[in-house]
Every structure is written in C-alpha cells, then in structure tokens.
Amino acid sequence: MAEPRVLPAWAEELRRRYVRSEASLFVLYGNVFDLLLHQGKLYRLTDFLSDVLLGDNKETIALYNLSSGVRFAKRGGRTDGLEELLLQKSADKVLPAFERILQTQDRLALIIEYAEMIAPMGDANFFSEADRQSVVMLHRWSLAPHLESADNIVLLVTENLAELHPKIVSNPKVATIRVPMPDRAERKALVRHVVPDMDEAWADRLAEITAGLKAIQLKGILEPTPPAAEDAQDREKLIVRLLGDGALPDRVKRLVQLTEGMKQGEICDLVAPKAAPGAAPAEDEAEREQRAEILRIIARRKREIIERECLGLIEFVEPEHDFSVVGGMDEVKRDLLTVAKNIREGRRNLCPMGILFTGPMGTGKTFVAEAFAKECGLTTIKFKNFRSKWVGATEGNLEKILTVIQAIGQVLVIIDEGDRAFGNSGDDGDGGTSSRVIARIKEFMSDTENRGRVVFILMTNRPDKLDIDIKRAGRLDKKIPFLYPQTAEDLEQVLLAQLRKHKLKADVVFPRDRDAVSAPLVGFSNADVEAITLLANQYASEAAASGDAAIDPAVMARAVADYLPSRDVQMLEYMELLAVFEASNRRMLPRKYAELSVEELQLRLARLRLEIGTRR
C-alpha cells in the first residue's frame, strides 16, 4: 500500500473543502511565486497543483495567463475544443471557450495565473467590456452546479487578494486560501535539502534566522555557486595557510588548479594530511568565516526583501543608541528593559501586544522608542504613507506590509502621530478607505499569534483624539506617560545624557552648579535641553582658540538666557494631563500627579478641554 502524501496545510485545506463540495472555484493568494519542497523535490506552485494535488484525479489540467496563453499540464479523455485554445491569449476569447468545455467535459482543472489581471479590483464604470465580461463569467462559474457535478475545479492564483475584484472575493461560493511563507520546519527541511551534509545545530540556526525569506530566496543563498575567480582566490588563501608562508608560488598555483571543485575538508586532506596541530584550525576558521558571511548575507537580504516587497511603503530604523544615553525616566526604562528581556528570551506570554507612548512634544518619545529597539534587538520599521489615490490600492499596500511583517516576525513597528493615523475612522470622505484600513490594522494588532513577535509602539501627544477601540487591552497593553522633567534633579539626568549622547566636554558638576544650570531649566522639554546644550557647545567653541573647549556653568547659563522656547502653556498642560490620565501605572508618574485623585484629574481635564480641546 502506497504511503499517504503529506500535503502542506493550505493544500490539505483546499483538498478537504473541495471534497466536501464547499466550492468548485478557489482563490489561492499570498506566497504564490515561491518554491515548495514536497517528498524531496522542489515545485513551483502551479507545478505542485498540476503534478501533485490534481494529477491523480483530473483527466485534463489546463493553465492560463494573459501573457503565455493556454498550456496543458495533462491531457486525457475527450479533448473537444481544446486545440483552438492554444492559439488564443485574450481573456474575452479564452474564458468563453473554457466555459463551453467546463459544461461538456468531466474531471477538468483550470488554473488561472495572475487572476488580478483578468478580474482586477476597481470601479466597474472604468472597466473595458472585456474586464466586465471576465468578472461576470468568473462569478457565474462559482455558482454553476455543473462544475460540482462534473468534478471540475477552477483555481485563481493571485499574490494580493486586495487586487482581485470584490465580486469574486466576497462571493460565499468562492473559497479563498492563503499560501503562507515557509515556516521554521519548512525552512529547515529546505536547508537540509540544499545542503544535505550540514550539521543539525547549524541547520536549526539557519532555519531560525531566515524567518521571512521565501524558499527560492533561501535556496539562492545556500546553493553552492559554480567555480569562479573568487572561488580560486579562497582556495589559494586556504592552501597558503596550510602550507605556511614559505610555500613556493608555483606549487600553490598548481594546487589551486588541482583542487577546483573540491570542498575545504578534501583540500586539507590532500594538501596537508599530517598538518601540525597549529595548522589544523585553518578549516574551522574558514568555516566560521563562511558562516559569518552567510549570516551577514541573510541579514542584508531580509532587509532588501522587506523594502522590495513593501515597495518603499515602510522605513527602516537603525538606532545607534540604547538606554545609556536616555536621561531620567527610571521607571519607564525599567519597564521597557523588562519587556526587552522577555522578547530576547522568548517569553512571549509576558510581552505586550503594543505600547502607547503619550505626552507633550519634545519629551523624548521617539528617542526612547529607538533606544528600546536597540535594547530588544528587533527589526524596527516605521510606516510611511501607504495610501494611494487609486481604488483598492491602499488596502492592497497595507496587506503587503502586514503579510511581510507577520512572516518575518521579531519586528517592532513604530507609528508616529498615532492620532492622525487612527483618529478619524468615521470619516467617509474617502469612500470608507480610512475605516477599512484602521479596522484591518486593529485586527492585526489584536492577533494573539503575533504576541512577542510583532510589537507596536504608537506615539501621540493627543490620545484624546485616538479611536478609543485602539487603546483597549489586547492592542495597546502598556500606556507610558512622557512628561517634562519636574525637578532640577530630573533635569540634570537629561542634561548629562545629552552630553554623553553628543560626546561633549563639560565642566559642569551637580549639585554644585544646580542653581546656575539646571534650576532655570525646570519646565523645559527634553528637546529644549538638547538645543540649549548644543547652543552652549557652540558658544564655548567660539570663545576658545582651538574650537574644542569644555562647557562651563557660565557658558551654560548664557545659553539658557539666550534660548527662547516656543511655549503654549495651556496646551502643554492639557497634553500632560492627558498623558497622566492614560498612564497604566501610578508609579510612572511624578509626585505632582501621582497624588491626584481621579476626580481631581477629570475636573482639571474638563476645564482645559472646554478652553482648548478642539485645537490641534
């Protein structure tokens, strides 16, 4: 008895739903342009469908796309009318011909590649006659009882579901099935397939760090390259190490030619089979260098993939600083360091789904978010403007971003100006696009499968303008207030951190210089303190002949007196109170606010809201 085939989960779902007669028209979307490893052989998706999934029970299997027209993976039984299709490419001729065949023949499978080009998303008013005909015909096929009774099946293949016409996608008689990116087990199986002699620990390591890579991309990294000039140089370096510096150039050259195509171990056995103990580690060293290079290639390739897949819709953040240059905010740093430790150690159940940073402008929200990214070691991205003027393109762009983020995992997503991104879900001036986009992001943020793998940091100085549903537990579990330094001691920590960050020389000592330097700065924002510090450095450099002088208290006092911050006292107080009101824990609040009762806080907020609540 033959061994049962072990199908990928998505293929098993397709088979099960077809056998149960849930649908005869399926849409496959997602990672549809990749390779699939099945029973020791790599397949393209369409080849896997025709050779493995459908090959045993379909007499005829046809594939069609607008570029190459119709081709047959399998032909059997009656083939009336199939010959004329080989000469056609346009959908308005091919689809009606297939409709006639589907009505008259049994056990036929039709695979339509790039289905979004045949039934695209968009307003029907701007469709050509052929586009309208294709959409209507595919919709009718999904409802046709003769497809089911004749044991026929139609498979539409598209990378992005949002690019396919909604009349097809939303049809209850059409089954949509996502082809996911390869998971860890599949990546490890591919590594073992491409490099069979790789040791188990290294295969596990590669499977872990290649999350987000497609099988075809991983294969390209691991597959041995043909011998070339670079390969000859590597062999020459290895041979010189094995023979020693006194090796004759002619002998080295001959050995390089003889060892073409050989592995490092074989070269070592040939060149120096009885090498001294000191020479033996050459192979190990070369192997370590090779593995380090593979890790660098994978890291670079993952970034290239994200940028390419998302079409410039996101921005990478590469933080250069950690919490060592963040002054003050000890409770905030302690909380975030705990989160970073849980992420690094894989304790996903202790990680928040998302974090809200709220407080007035200039309090260091972005600076701390980037430092947190450095501490936890996650790939960090920011959303750019993924909205488009074209119908359906915004939703499609968002799906691309979310698909890549979910596949890669271990991602920190920073969303600045969160009140603008999530604060206007009820506005239908854009045809409901904003509502759909916000709803999709909310759905993604609350997916518990992403806990500890995808962490959102949402930043805003106006949390009152956020959609209240985005702030609930399960989306933004932690809410951290960012306030201006309340005391001279708090401000001194910020000032010293700025000196460390910019590597400035300073002859300022606390508490000796508190009255002259830090006390006058109470009430200033962190951004103001940074600006004053840089201004003081400029004054000190101008005064010194060498241009590299230390900042003393007199120079700092001059900079404080000369600096004019932009102040809107009422608005800043309102933003501070909003941040305090949103805080998850009282211990994060300064004494000035920690002792306020909820009733007092609400009264003060209500008063300010009446005066300035409608201002931006």
Image (spheres, rainbow, N blue to C red):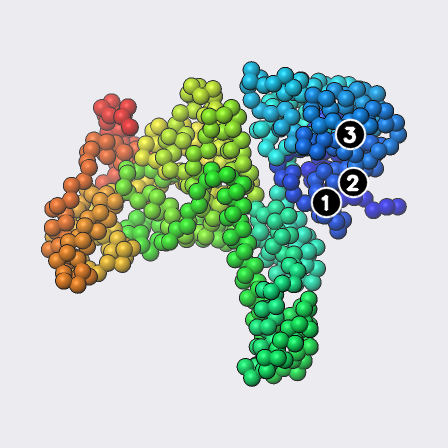
Classify mark 1: helix, strand or loop: strand
The reply, left or right, for residue 113 in relation to residue 546 is right
Classify mark 3: helix, strand or loop: helix
Q: Between marks 1 and 3, how big is the CA–CA gap?
A: 24 Å
Front residue of 493 and 80? 80
> Horizontal and vertical percent for residue 385?
43, 34
> Horizontal and vertical percent for residue 141?
72, 20
Image-quadrant location for residue 92 = top right
Q: Earlier in the sequence, mark 1 or mark 3?
A: 1
Cβ–Cβ below 8 Å for labels 1 and 3?
A: no
Packing grade of label 1 (10 A; few <14, some 14-19, many >=20) is: some
- At 22% from the left and 47% from the top, the residue drawn is 531
Which residue position is annotated with label 3? 86
Cβ–Cβ below 8 Å for labels 1 and 2?
A: yes
Q: Earlier in the sequence, mark 3 or mark 2?
A: 2
Using the rendered image of the protein, determine whether residue 446 is visible from the camera's viewpoint: no
Front residue of 371 and 482? 371
Between circles 3 and 2, the one closer to the viewer is 3
> Horizontal and vertical percent for residue 240?
58, 77
Using the rendered image of the protein, determine whether residue 455 is visible from the camera's viewpoint: yes
Which residue position is annotated with label 2? 51
Question: Which mark is on residue 172?
Answer: none
Q: Between marks 1 and 2, how big is the CA–CA gap?
A: 9 Å
Whether 439 is drawn above or below 361: the answer is: above
Q: Amino acid at mark 1?
A: Tyr
- At 26% from the left and 53% from the top, the residue drawn is 498
Which residue position is annotated with label 1? 43
Q: Earlier in the sequence, mark 1 or mark 2?
A: 1
